Image (spheres, rainbow, N blue to C red):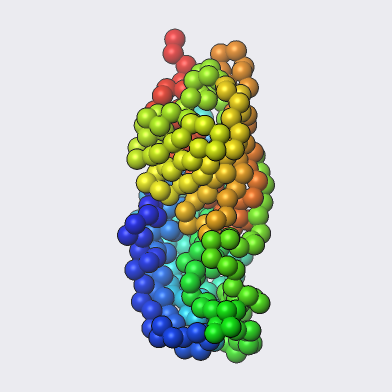
Amino acid sequence: MAKWGEGDPRWIVEERADATNVNNWHWTERDATNWSSDTLKSLLLGLTVENEEGACEVTEVGKVEGEASINNRKGKLIFFYEWTLKATWTGTSKSGIAYKGSIDVPNLSDENDMDDLDINVTMNKDEPETPLLALMRSTGAERLRAALGSYLGLLQTEFTQGMILPTANGVSKPQSSQSKTKLDKTQISSGTAAPPPNTGVKIPTCKFSMRETFLTSPTELYRVFLNQEMVQAFTHAQATVEPEKGGRFRLLDGNVLGEFTELVPDERLVMRWRYNTWPCEHYATIALTLSDRTSETELKAEFRGVPTNEEERTRQGWQRYYFEAIKQTFGFGARLY
């Protein structure tokens, strides 16, 4: 799992600008290559699709070649990026037969729309035919496209923090038109005023829900989310958890932060939750409802206020690093006979 704490390469940047650039007049450039490489790998690795024929997963991201940078000229942000990606997918049919194939993305670039992105999915040589190839070429390709779209959203909203400096009057300078038409679709202007520090920014958000079943009691599952040692066990990382209303938590070495706003023992947890790469002070609201199903517990997770371009990443993160990790760590996913 990618880490975005101290030493985050997005802060190891090259900036060619004078500290007195109060009117955003000079050219400022940030090299986003290292950050982009890590982010692309994180978004693609572990991506899964499933239907009645079986399940497929991206198990390796073997090639991430290219570069990315952001330029600020007179208050305008201009994005340059060009990437070639190669990954490996594995599939398992309902009957237990394993398959292996490749994913090739040759043209992730600022010159191409996301809809025009080529996503080539193939089977390895000597592999037998399987309906799972069609699954990867349809639903799988859609998920891959959405994940790569999340990368562009993060590049445009998160990596750019601090690039538009306030003017002498405390607001950003109005934007002028951009002459390079090919870059129109990857530009962001700073708007009328820079938001005050630590107040968050207004961004498009979405809501969605997820359901999962655990072979344990509501009491035990409720405890998993509040017990610091258990959280550290299923995340395999340092964590701080204050198990009370208003209590804060810090998971995955600071990559996930939040606060419990409602706790109903064995029934419901509500939290303010965020990745530390989201815009400053922006939190989603996540409500977990636990329902006793005799020999198992159904968990319904309701997400509100998730940045639109972070929906796929958030879904995958909760599925992989919460639900699946909890089942594997505590044995809540398999029946014992």
Q: In the picture, residue 245 is in which quadrant?
A: top right
Asked if residue 262 shows in the view, the reply is yes
Residue 38 to residue 328: above or below: below
User: Which residue in the rendered view is the most extreme toward the left?
Assistant: 7
Residue at coordinates 52% horizontally, 25% vertically from top-left? 222
Identity of the residue drawn at 34% across and 57% down: 6
Furthest toward the top, the residue is 337
Camera-nearest residue between 80 and 114: 80
Q: Nearer the viewer, residue 66 or 27?
A: 27
Is 207 above or below relative to 325? below
281 vs 318: above or below: below
Residue nearer the viewer, 287 or 143: 287
State the quadrant of the C terminus: top left
Q: Is residue 312 left or right of residue 251?
A: right
User: How many labels sit on residues?
Assistant: 0
Q: What is the x, y in percent for residue 269?
A: 58, 32
Specify whether 253 is left or right of 114. Answer: left
Q: Nearer the viewer, residue 189 or 25?
A: 25
Residue at 57% in and 50% down: 283
Q: Looking at the picture, how far across and down is residue 35, in whole percent? A: 39, 64
Decide if residue 109 is on the left or right side of residue 86. Answer: right
On the image, the x and y values in percent for residue 105 come to 47, 62
Whether residue 210 appears in this view of the structure is: no
User: What percent of the width, then of the height, locates residue 63?
Assistant: 36, 60
Residue at the (46%, 40%) spot, across then down: 249
